Amino acid sequence: TLVGAAVAVLATLIPRSNLRNLDELFSDAIVVTDSLVSVWREATEYLCSGERSAARLRLESRIDSLELLATAVKRNLDGGWWEVLGRPRARRRRDLLALYHANAESVQEVIAIIKFSVLTEQFSAGQQHFFGVTGKAMQILVKETSILMWLCLQASEDGVIDDWEKDEIQMLVDSVHERQDQLQDAYL
């Protein structure tokens, strides 16, 4: 009777809307990934375009909305911990999604720096030369990183990262590192 009363009290304290936080977390991660990938691609295209335009204001707005999306994901991470109690596979899925979100946040920090560049870029001759020399390498890096992000998110969906997923992720990580080196070489 005491245990039943404790469960009843606990049930009144836990909001019903959070009963599917794990599913919401994955859905939010899809939206965040799609937004990060498209904003990063569009910002790179804008910087490589060679001219200042209203596109910078659209990018600013989209980058600002990413912060709201990240807040929603963080809320689901913080609010849904109890959903995985006694469910090891769900716990692994949540842990993988939390790790994915932490890495997506680091990409979002890069996007914040890109936002500054997009808003302040004057497209001087020197800057146009810089983007002319590094633009292709930047675009390839964005593409490879985007593929890696989607693969990592997909691998975390079921809470189990299979050996073939590990191999593919490692291959893409190595490729992203190569692309970073190519970007640095283009810059130097």
Image (tube, grey):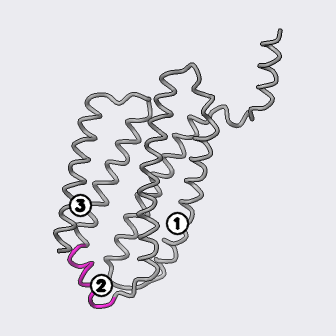
SS state under label 2 = helix
Residue 42 is situated, as x and y percent measured from the top left of the image, at 39, 68
Q: What residue type is labelled 3?
A: Gln
Q: Which of 96 and 137 is in front in this view?
A: 96
Q: Mark 1 points at which residue?
A: 62
Give the residue at mark 2.
127
Mark 3 crowd level (few <14, some 14–19, many ≥20, 10 Å Cα):
some
CB under 8 Å between discs 1 and 3: no
On the image, numbered disc 3 is attached to which residue? Answer: 180
Please determine whether, in this image, residue 101 is positioned above or below residue 22: below
| Image quadrant where residue 40 sits | bottom left
Gap between marks 1 and 3 measured at Cα: 25 Å
- Residue 16, given in percent of the width and then of the height, sits at 73, 33
Of callouts 2 and 1, the N-terminal one: 1
The C terminus lies in which quarter of the figure? bottom left
Q: Looking at the picture, which amino acid does disc 2 mark?
A: Gln
Closer to the chain start, of discs 3 and 2, is 2
Q: What stretch is highlighted in magenta?
A: 124-134
Left or right: 177 as drawn, with respect to 65: left
Q: Quadrant of the N terminus?
A: top right
Residue at 27% from the left image edge and 67% from the top image edge? 138
81 versus 131 height, above or below: above
Q: Does the magenta stretch include residue 125?
A: yes
Residue 176 x %, y %: 25, 53
Q: Nearer the viewer, residue 13 or 148?
A: 13
Prevailing secondary structure of the magenta residues: helix
